Image: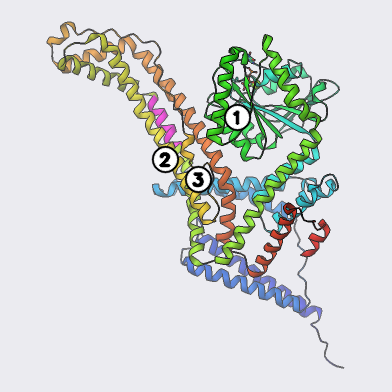
Amino acid sequence: MGLPDSLNSSHKHHLLTSFKHVDDLLSDIESILASSTSMSPFPKYRQAILPVQIKVVQDYIARIRAQMIQVLKSQDISPPDPQFAATRSVRVNLEFAEIAFDECGPDALRGYGPVPDPLIPELNGMVEEMRSLLRKLRTYLAQDIGQDPQARLQRLDGTTAEIALLKTLERIINERGLVEFRSALAIILDKLESNSFQIALFGRVSSGKSSLLNHILGMDVLPVGVNPITAVPTRIMHGPEPALTVSYLDRSTERLEIGRLSEFVSEQFNPGNSKHVMRIVVDWPAQRLQDGVVFVDTPGLGSLATAGAAETLAYLPQCDLGVVLVDAGSTLNQEDLSTLQSLDQAAIPAMVLLSKADLHGPEDRDRLMEYITNQISSKLGLKLAVHPVSIKGECTKLLDEWFEKEIQPLCGRHQESAQQSVRRKTGALCEAVEAALKVRVELTAKGSKEQRENLQYAEAHLRKATGEFEVVNTFCLRASEEIRTLGRMGLSRAATDVAQRWFSEGAKEANTRDVVVRNLVETATEGANQVYRKIQGLGQDLSRALVAAASALQVDAPRDENLASVVKEMPRLDLGPIEVNLHRGFLAVLGEAWVRRQVEKKLRGQVGPAVDEAFQRYGRVLESWSRRMLAELRRQFDAHADGYRAQLERLAGTGTAGPDETDAIRRDLKTLSRFHSGQPVVPAHQILDIH
Ligand SMILES: Nc1nc2c(ncn2[C@@H]2O[C@H](COP(=O)(O)OP(=O)(O)OP(=O)(O)O)[C@@H](O)[C@H]2O)c(=O)[nH]1
Ligand SMILES: [Mg+2]
């Protein structure tokens, strides 16, 4: 009897358990390596391993693992099925990870000793980046299985021509780990499933969005008014009866009387969305809502905006048409331009309305419209028509005209428009995925140590820049707080100036008020300028980090690369009507120092409380201005940085693609190029068979 030509099951079992044990040990080594480079305040190991050694150890671990897989394969041994539901374990770990990351921030670290100032931005950046990644990952894992893009695509099969491309994109995103494109894909699938055409109204606070929608739909359910009103984006869609559906973040959805809308939608009754409303849908039986047209009323943007503005910006990429209202009473500003720019970046068609057109006669109106069109064209390079509208008197016919000429035909063609919108979004996603793949192949082709270092440098640069936000934010809060108390200092400075003038130039009493006001304004401005310069400096740092990332990835830097230009229109000190009544009179015979004290005392008595209050107010205004500027910088920075970061991490971390992967990526690129070259496309099932 000859020997059997393969290992028996006990042999195999022994091999498998031994390999499994080795693999666990290797994982431990990986965690030792990881912890030796970790920023954690509680390192487990002393830093005895140099970065270059770590790299070598990692390479060997990879080789040992590859070898084990080879051996198992050649002996026909298959590893056992996994025992735990991975998503659950991952979610549990992520919860702990978030807590752990919070503990790595400089504030937490300070409990263990002083943290060197230059390290603070980097630490903050790490915590911020990690938390944002963890949040995204958790949201993704929290979706039930019906939300899995593959299953959703399966259900949508045959509904539109884009499905084949979307399936290919889904596969590539998955296989190549391009997680940054998942949310874009999810938005497209939402669209395909809901089959609606969403027309959203954007604009600054009080530009007339809610009034306009009430008028268009023949209703008065949306609250309107002069203060910031709308706090939560509100979708209005066709329904047989007026009704209201409110979904919350933390409890189940409710269906309510339509009359209760303002309890949820308005800033007054739901300030800062304290009721945790996620989604508001109004059913309304209007003819204009048929064919699946949905209108969306959004919280106002701009300098007077409330927390709702963030909801508006988060909602923005989901609409099919963005209608931006520019108030005829206040004309176009930077905020309107950046809304239009965000729509453009999200590949969403936009229209501009000159609202409250009744405020001007036809000639002024035409001039304003021409000005707005020119500004949009010169500042953004976009050709957009501007339509005047109004809900008052005679001018309502302008609104009806706009609706009939521009919107009705679109609604009629909504099915087609919805498909166009999906096509455009899919096209944009396809281009972005292709760009990400190309970078991997190209950098692999040229792949050198220097290149790798470039990537790591750019990655660290982005991280540092992200961390600067927290530092600048703290600085601005402190500076705004200080400005609130500068009223006293401003007055004594004014007193010194007044006294000096009286002694050096002779009395010019008529100018005393101007001298005082100038000194107060200068005091406030010096403080505010620090805030301004800090935020502008941040804008420049962020732009540099983006340019460095783009150049390391060898892609074009963003068009709007100068983020510092976001920082505009710093508020000024508003002293209100103050009366100063100082006379040199008999004081002139006394010494300058004494006079100065008298002047200061008089000034305090006359305008002290008003000045204090003006500085208090100015501090608050400046604080909210700096918050807004930082939020806007953050939004613009993240729009580019998220994608760069993901690519840099992949390339600098796991390295460029190996030869097999490079071939696979080339095949992916070829498959994608067929979709837009109009060549016959391989059916989806065959594409999946290629690999
Ligand atoms: N003259 C004139 N005033 C208007 C017109 N439309 C709206 N208004 C006024 O503008 C103010 C703001 O209107 P809203 O519709 O609440 O503005 P909004 O853009 O929804 O404001 P938020 O929800 O706070 O962002 C109200 O006092 C309206 O009466 C218009 O066509 N002409
Ligand atoms: Mg409103």
Q: For mark 2, does the 10 Å Cα neighbourhood hold few (<14), some (14 to 19), or many (20 or more) residues?
A: some
Q: For mark 3, does the 10 Å Cα neighbourhood hold few (<14), some (14 to 19), or many (20 or more) residues?
A: many
Location of residue 21 in the rendering, given as x and y in whole percent from the top left corner: 67, 71
Point out the tag, 1 or 2, that comes first from the N-terminus: 1
Quadrant assignment for the N terminus: bottom right
Q: Residue at x 69, y 23 (%)?
A: 264
Q: CA distance from mark 1 to mark 2?
A: 25 Å
Q: Are marks 1 and 3 in contact (CB under 8 Å)?
A: no
Q: How many marks?
A: 3
Location of residue 662 in the rendering, given as x and y in whole percent from the top left corner: 65, 66
- The quarter of the rendering in which ligand 2 is drawn is top right
Reading the image, the residue beneath label 3 is 466
Q: Tell me: 233 left or right of 162.
A: left
Q: From the Cβ of disc 3, is ligand 1 less than 8 Å away?
A: no
Point out the tag, 1 or 3, that comes first from the N-terminus: 1
Amino acid type for the residue under numbered disc 3? Thr
The disc placed on residue 537 is: 2
Quadrant assignment for the C terminus: bottom right
**Residue 526 is drawn in which quadrant?**
top left
- Write the start and end of the magenta stretch as one range: 473-483
Amino acid type for the residue under numbered disc 2? Gly
The disc placed on residue 564 is: none
Q: Is residue 73 magenta?
A: no
Location of residue 176 in the rendering, given as x and y in whole percent from the top left corner: 67, 58
Q: Main secondary structure of the magenta part?
A: helix
Reading the image, the residue beneath label 1 is 309
Please name whichever residue, 311 or 557, is drawn nearer the observer in this view of the structure. Answer: 557
Amino acid type for the residue under numbered disc 1? Ala
Q: CA distance from mark 1 to mark 3?
A: 22 Å
Q: Residue at x 55, y 49 (%)?
A: 101
